Image (spheres, rainbow, N blue to C red):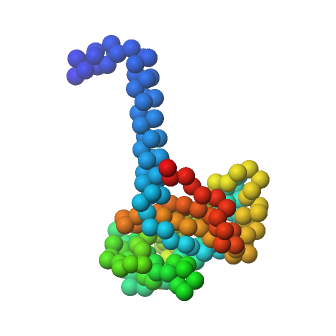
Amino acid sequence: MMKLSALWQRIPKAVLFGVAILLQCALLILMVADRTQILREGREVTLQTRPVDPRDLLRGDYVTLGYDITQLPAGALAGQPSAERNPVVFVKLAPDADGLYRAVSVHAAPVAVTAPEVLIRGRVSYSCGSTGRIFCDRLTIRYGLESYFVPEGEGRKLEQARNQQKLRIVAAVLPSGRAAIKRLLLDGEPVYEEPWY
């Protein structure tokens, strides 16, 4: 133990600082690469946004988004025990006649889907107000698609479009269920698109 601490003290502080910076850069690169993989390889699904509680309309230069798939009936999961407080769930989505993806069912583990169905991963954010770990009859699910950064001054226009249900998003969804916003559609036309190189 003494040899290790003596060795540690002999390393110049500049070297330790450089290693710390390199580790942070490596983590940042991994995060960007992960998002790029979702956007490049994920299957596109179009989701309808819906108005959210006015207390959370806009914070800074991003728009808060809610979806038709945010609050869903638990189905077969209702009343079942959960392994954790905010459990991961998988929502099976299928397109309707307009090409919008709608929830079909909610599952505690991945299930098989057939094209054009998609399985999207989310986390239950509402626990029925109890301390027990039991699935409620209705679930509030977050998918990591609930906010979108926009150029300064553009948020109000998108808020109004969202509240009028003129705003939709196209999400890229990997077979694992992980998803990311790929583009925003205003009246069916792309207004913002994420670069995925």
Q: What x and y, as percent, mark residue 38?
A: 44, 58
Q: Position of residue 74 (x, y in %)?
A: 45, 81
In the rendered image, residue 147, in percent from the top left (x then y), is placed at: 61, 60
Camera sees residue 79? no
From the viewer's perspective, tell me whether residue 8 is left or right of residue 159.
left
Q: In the rendered image, is residue 108 in sight?
A: yes
- Nearest the viewer among 136 and 34 is 34
**On the image, which quarter does residue 91 sit in?**
bottom left
Q: Quadrant of residue 82?
A: bottom left
Pick the front one: 137 or 72: 72
The number of discs equals 0
Q: Is residue 140 above or below residue 184?
A: below
Q: Quadrant of the N terminus?
A: top left
Measured from the top left, where is residue 24 in percent x and y? 45, 35
Q: Residue at x 31, y 19 (%)?
A: 8
Judge by depth and name the residue closer to the eye, 132 or 20: 20
Q: Residue at x 50, y 60 (%)?
A: 180
Say if 100 sits above or below 23 in the image: below
Query: Which residue shows up at 44% across the image and 23% down it?
Result: 17
- Point 43% across, 23% down: residue: 18
Side (left or right) of 14 relative to 4: right
